Amino acid sequence: MAKTLVLVASLLILGNVFFSHASFSPSVIVDIATIILNNYCSPEKLVGMKEAIEAASSNTGILNMPDAETLANVLSSGVQHTVSDPRLKVSYEPNYAPAVPPKLPPLPPEQLIAVIQNSMKLDILEGNIGYLRIDHILGEEAAEKVGPLLLDLVWSKILPTSALIFDLRYTGSGEVTGIPYIVSYFTEAEPLIHIDSIYDRPSNTTTPFFTMPDLLGQRYGATKSIIVLTSKNTKGIAEDVAYCLQNLKRATIVGEKTAGGSVKTDKFKAGDSDFYVTVPTAKSINPVTGSTWEVTGVTPDVEVNAEDALATAIKIINLRAQVPAIIEGSATLIADNYAFENIGSDVAAKLKEQLESGTYNMVVSKQSLESKLSADLQTLSGDKSLKTTSNTPALPPMDYTPEMYIELIKVSFHTDVFENNIGYLRFDMFGDFEEVKPIAQVIVEHVWNKVLNTNALIVDLRNNLGGPTTAIAGFCSYFFDADKQIVLDKLYDRSSGTITELQTLQELTGVRYGSKKSVIILTSGATAGAAEEFVYIMKKLGRAMIIGETTAGASHPPKTFQVGETDIFLSIPTVHSDNSAGPAWEGAGIAPHIPVPADAALDTAKGIFNKHR
């Protein structure tokens, strides 16, 4: 209420400031405020205006005005600021003549054809992509008159295309009744969809708009790609159409943010003066978003300059044309190679269902396709390692000097000896066996020998993200005696259909820690991959106590597969620990013997060892 009192008061004050020569009555200000009160589309912003107008009506002073246009501009600014709506406008137009909306006159068929052809642009682009530009959206009445001709001259050419670019960059006018007509051609006949609600203030009525069950001609359908082009000149009803299609997930908007116009504005004369008030008298509320495009405009899904929108749209459609083959190829690779056959087959089938449902119709770039495919694969499988990936080639081997190796090892491993001769070893990544083998002696001398003669050992894998599993058997072997070879795990490789036994090694570089001294392994939710395999083995064989958090539940190191001849690559785990009861640790992770927060695990381990020493 305070805001509206300020509105009327500011109008009167502005009148007193700016009027000093020509005669002017404050009643005009009251007329302006009354017009806004009775016609503005958001009356909730005007609470208290009626009382303010009644108070202002008692001011009957005569004011003088040097510059009516300047006053109109200042009044506009005051009104817009007070109500926070730039569409409200006061103008001074002594020669104003109301515009008469053009009506389609009766025309012979050949002239009607010429009118339609001049108001629309139609083209079939390379790749069977339809292009349709319209600069004015026809309403129900006009559509009924020219409907058969539109079908013959325009729609019959668009229907056979595989995708459509709908150009609204130059569309600045239209009829509100045209909204359901256009939207309905891009949706199914059933069920009917509530697409918009228009509130008309003068009549105080709300009209809901639904998609139409019956249309002249065939629908374009609900699955073929549609790109709507927009610019800062896209205004009014065209914005409503774009907003509806965008929020129905039926079209992708490419271009610039639209003008942020109105579904309907009217111009009113203020009393007997030459002042006029432009007021948005109706407003659109989208039932999907509960919001509107008015004032704020429609934000495109892909924002580019208007002149680049068409080329961008063509690129998006060409990408979408490849999507079915990419999804089908991905499904086949997963079904044939994913470590757990039943899960792989289920994921592949559901991925194809996702494709059929049209959820991939809205991708706009290779990155968005990869992101969606990764998210779907991880959701369907529960496996964070099953995803898209880049095909980054391995770095060539580095030619390190012995001194460089020593420095590298020092920063890769952390060792310590705590109270009561308790050893501590931390490393955050497992190395490949073939890469580690040549420097094994260096690692033994500069790392292993520092903890070898301790009474007990804490192995800290809380930050270990995994790596290759080829060195797991060798590392495990240091914690078992040499007199007996032990099967640590059996790994099933889905791609080759083979099972490989991981066994302790008979020969090692350096001295074993042995099977008698106590070992505690620290874990966290970040402990993943090869580190989990090591934890799994040590826990399963009763060789170590696990303290900390349940591990990540990742997978054995995945392999990279190219999807057909495309530049899309998949990371697919192909190996799993051979466990007849189901996944051993993959997916679920490994639960610790003593669950504590990761940052408390080290102190907990020290406490246990110190208590028993």
Image (cartoon, rainbow, N blue to C red):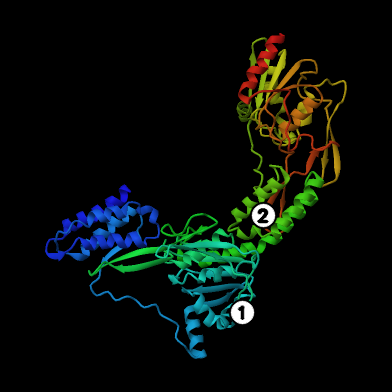
The residue tagged 1 is 156
Considering every residue shown, the one lying at the far right of the view is: 484
- Which residue is nearer to you in this view: 280 or 169? 280
- Which residue is nearer to you in this view: 429 or 220? 220
Rendered location of residue 59, percent (x, y): 18, 56
Does residue 130 appear left or right of residue 199 in this picture? Answer: right
Residue sitting at x 24%, y 75%: 95
Does residue 441 appear left or right of residue 163 in this picture? Answer: right
The residue tagged 2 is 568
Q: CA distance from mark 1 to mark 2?
A: 37 Å
What element does badge 1 sit on?
helix
In the image, residue 297 above or below residue 129: above
In the image, residue 326 above or below residue 596: below
Residue sitting at x 19%, y 58%: 15
Does residue 146 appear left or right of residue 582 in this picture? Answer: left
For residue 91, what is the image quadrant? bottom left
What element does badge 2 sit on?
loop
Report the quarter where the C terminus lies.
Answer: top right
Rendered location of residue 255, percent (x, y): 48, 62
Q: Amino acid at mark 2?
A: Ile
For residue 529, what is the image quadrant? top right
- Which residue is nearer to you in this view: 176 or 152? 176
Disc 2 residue crowd, few under 14, some 14–19, many 20+, Cα 10 Å: some
Residue sitting at x 47%, y 88%: 106
Q: Amino acid at mark 1?
A: Ser
